[in-house]
Amino acid sequence: MAPKIEYLSGGIGAEFRPVADKLADIVSVKDFGAAGNGTNQDGEAQAAYDALISGGGGTLCFPRGDYRLELSAVSRTTGLEGEGRQSSIIKPTTNDGVALQFGFALAGTDGPNIARLGLAGVGARQGTGIRCGGLIYSENVEYVGFGTLEKLHVRNFDKGFHRPWGNIGFSLTDCVFYDNNYGLFSVANPGRLPPDETRFGDPMHAGCLNMLRGQIQFSRKAAVYIDGKSVIGSGQILFDSTIFEANPGWVFYVKDFNDRDRVPAPRVRDCWSETNNTAPSVDVEGDVRQPRYGHFSDVPYWIFENTPVGSLDLRKSQIVTKDCPLDAMEAVDMDAESTLFHDGARLFTGTAFGIVRSIGGIDNVDADNNNTPWYPMPVPKAFRRLDPSRVLLLSHGQVPETWTGATLLSTTTVSDDPALCGLPDVQQLTCTTGPQMYPSTAIQFPAGKWIVSQIVLRHVAGSITRTVPLLGASGRGGGSWNRNAEWRTMTSIVRNDTATAGSNFFWHFVGADSVLRFAGYAITAWDSFEDALDFANSGAFPAPPVQTYAVANAVASRAFDADTVTTAELADIVATLVGDLASRGIVAR
């Protein structure tokens, strides 16, 4: 009789077990004849997987090797694990094959764990790395999900991770998608498909996808493609601490993603973005054009947090950034139904697109070399009384001004376009000869102060490529682009280390054929960055100075008996007084 061989694990409390019993804990594809030599087709892996299912499930192991197979994963209780994503490699048997395809027979809310494997295409970016269901609808395919993918490396496919019918959810952790046409490709299942509205199972969103500490690189068409098909409940997508780098195509291409069912909005937070959208043109499902960082069409709400956001193409969508650097956002093409808001915005130089609801910090505090960033903020809703020593320059746009430059120009008063705190008038400036124009008042900036500049303006007609430098003749400050047709408060914050001598002006235009309206401008000086930032974000504008003035003769000469004066006479007197105050820019009508 052969001797009984037993196994004893180290540690207190360990017990002897038969070696045969111990070996049964691990099921390897090589136990069933898979070679893993990169040449033989390893269909035996499917037999190993099926045998593990029949035994109640577990984890199928792929030892170090190069396997040629296309595995159909049909069990929620059976996972896959390799010895490392650069060591255990699975390649499809054909160029357009699918390395790993999920297709659970029953609906459910659990899924397997797939870990420490590499998936590599055998053609030139053909086939699919991981697919949830087949291209042809099958029963319950929309419930393929709630699986976890960990430490995978998926490369050289048309689609790295493909969800053709939506699914109930997936989590990806420490996964790399490298040199695919699409990194992640998701399409919702609307339940019925045109033209005959044939029913295809239950509607299923393309959301519930979480990616943590991932990397998507060299995506030729789009790193992330999502077609939500307007399925109710779309949302809850999270990219966290993920790297998007060197993708020639779009980073995000999202359409018809309507999170309309009380679900969390999609969110991209703490992600890296660098050297994307470099291809001159790409074809994304028939949309052929030069890519940008993101295309969002019919996406009601999408949030970026602490993530550099590049140029955007927006159609009927709302994008919100929070604490994001905006320097990479070099262009934004958006329709009238789209909005772009920034909370805690940061810039090193240039002018932000969209509406900055608050400034978060100053990436560039030095006004030298014309680098001061500008933020288009909402129009102030209230005046704030400041110490007169803080106010270096102030206009409320109520009276015409003469602007100095190559040609003297005078502004004209417009009374049907109020903007600043209800004041009735604004000033319009028409540049027709290409002068450098600035208000005639010269000021000096004190040393060691933080300077807040505010310009309430809007572009009316003509060219919008007109810069507005901060300090004119002294050569300090930065440029702002007057691209907004709606009223905005262009705001900047900069530290002034040394006192500026000579003629320093607030702004000047460069170019011709531009019509602008301004409702006021102000330069204020603050002792600390915190005070300057608080004022810039307060939604306030320096109040008109307290004035002593003579009441209009029409009021002063009116005598009346308090016991007999009529309501109409009092109303006439008050209206005359308010009109006089308003004409001086002291109160609003």
Image: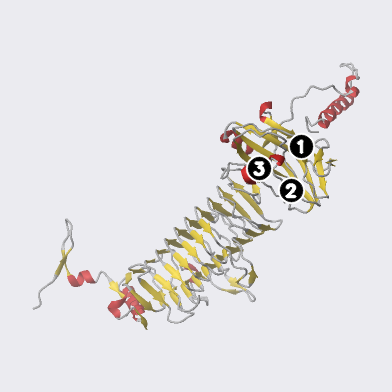
Q: Earlier in the sequence, mark 1 or mark 2?
A: 1
Label 3 SS: loop
Which quarter of the figure has residue 26? Answer: bottom left
Label 2 SS: loop
In this view, 113 is above or below 562: below
User: Nearer the viewer's eye, disc 2 or disc 3?
Assistant: 3
In this view, 284 is above or below 444: below
**Residue type (three-letter) at the residue carrying disc 2:** Glu
The residue lying furthest to the bottom in this view is: 40
Question: Pointer 3: residues within 10 angstroms few (<14), some, or many (20+)?
Answer: many
* Callouts 1 and 2 close, C-beta under 8 Å: no
Q: Would residue 310 be visible to someone looking at this image?
A: yes
Left or right: where 126 falls relative to 312? left
The N terminus - image quarter: bottom left
The residue at the point 56 percent across, 60 percent down is 234
Give the camera-side residue of 561 and 495: 495
Give the camera-side residue of 266 and 120: 120
Label 1 SS: loop
For label 3, the residue is 477
**Residue type (three-letter) at the residue carrying disc 1:** Gly
Q: Earlier in the sequence, mark 1 or mark 3?
A: 1
For label 2, the residue is 486
Q: Point out residue 461 in the picture as x, y percentages from the top left corner.
A: 80, 52
User: Nearer the viewer's eye, disc 1 or disc 3?
Assistant: 3
Label 2 and label 3: CA atoms lie apart by 24 Å
